[in-house]
Amino acid sequence: MARAEVHGRLMVLHWLPGTVADIRVETPTSRTILFDVPDWPGHLAGQHIDIRLTAEDGYSTQRSYSLAAPTDDERIEIMVQEVPDGEVSPFLVQDLLPDDVIELRGPIGGWFTWEPSLDVPVSLVAGGSGIVPLMAMIRARAQAGSNADFKLLYSVRGPQDEYYADELAKHSIEVTRIYTRATSPSGRPAGRVDPSDLAMLWPPDAGARTYVCGPTGFVEAVAKLLVDDGHDPRAIRTERFGPSGG
């Protein structure tokens, strides 16, 4: 299985203890959490981890979270958006404290990844918190001093829902924001991504790779728009969360 051989590190099959090193408030309902993980093998931008919580009665549950930053020795970073009535995210957002120890496993995934050695333009399309693994790619680009040409199309409800707004302004990439419930900075009326918005990305003949991440319905709609616009499906990589067809 070719993907399982990428750097020999797609997945660590055992659970590791992650000690909370820092917690940062992103929005009232989201947190960036940094963990120190002994013997962390390193990861690629775009990969994710599983987190497992276990109750005193032995009941356990787990969720997957994208890594938000490139490898930094034994420290890893995620961003958690609280899901109403969720089992895991409310605890991570509301109750987790520095020095708490959480079980985690990873890195996981090999298809939805970017490396500085990839010498082609890159289009990034994010819906809401789908910006997280794409932010890892943007940070990895800066960390490596890469000259890869990145363009980001970022769809959120409104400016109050943006993640990493200040940091994005510091990176030398072209960012286009689309607000679904407010007028966008460009003057674009509120609304979902439509065919005309694809003009903000690399055109089909540019030889670019495109990464799309967000809720399932968003990803499916954007991927279809890209293919209908003439983009090569083999150059479109997607990562989604939530139920299908939503």
Image (spheres, grey):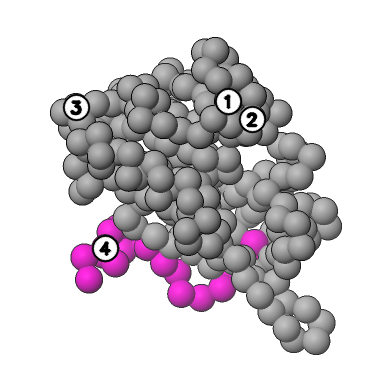
The secondary structure type at the circle numbered 4 is helix
Instruction: Kindly report which numbered mark, 2 or 3, lies closer to the viewer in this rendering.
Output: 2
Marked residue nearer the N-terminal end (4 or 1): 4
The secondary structure type at the circle numbered 3 is helix
Q: At which x and y percent is residue 175?
A: 46, 22
Residue 206, which numbered label? 3
Residue 190, which numbered label? 1
Residue 181, which numbered label? 2
The secondary structure type at the circle numbered 1 is loop
Task: Indicate the amino acid at tag 3.
Answer: Ala
Tell me where residue 187 sits by quadrant: top right
Marked residue nearer the N-terminal end (2 or 3): 2
**How far is disc 4 from disc 3 in space, using C-alphas?**
26 Å
Q: Specify the segment rendered in magenta.
A: 1-18
Q: Residue at x 48, y 61 (%)?
A: 244
Q: Quadrant of the N terminus?
A: bottom left
| Contact, mark 4 vs mark 2 (Cβ under 8 Å) | no
Task: Indicate the amino acid at tag 1.
Answer: Ala
Residue 94 vs residue 167: left or right?
right
Q: At which x and y percent is residue 132?
A: 54, 43
Instruction: Kindly report which numbered mark, 3 or 1, lies closer to the viewer in this rendering.
Output: 1
Residue 3, which numbered label? 4
| Contact, mark 2 vs mark 1 (Cβ under 8 Å) | yes
The secondary structure type at the circle numbered 2 is loop
Task: Indicate the amino acid at tag 4.
Answer: Arg
**How far is disc 3 from disc 1 in space, using C-alphas?**
29 Å
Front residue of 15/53: it is: 53
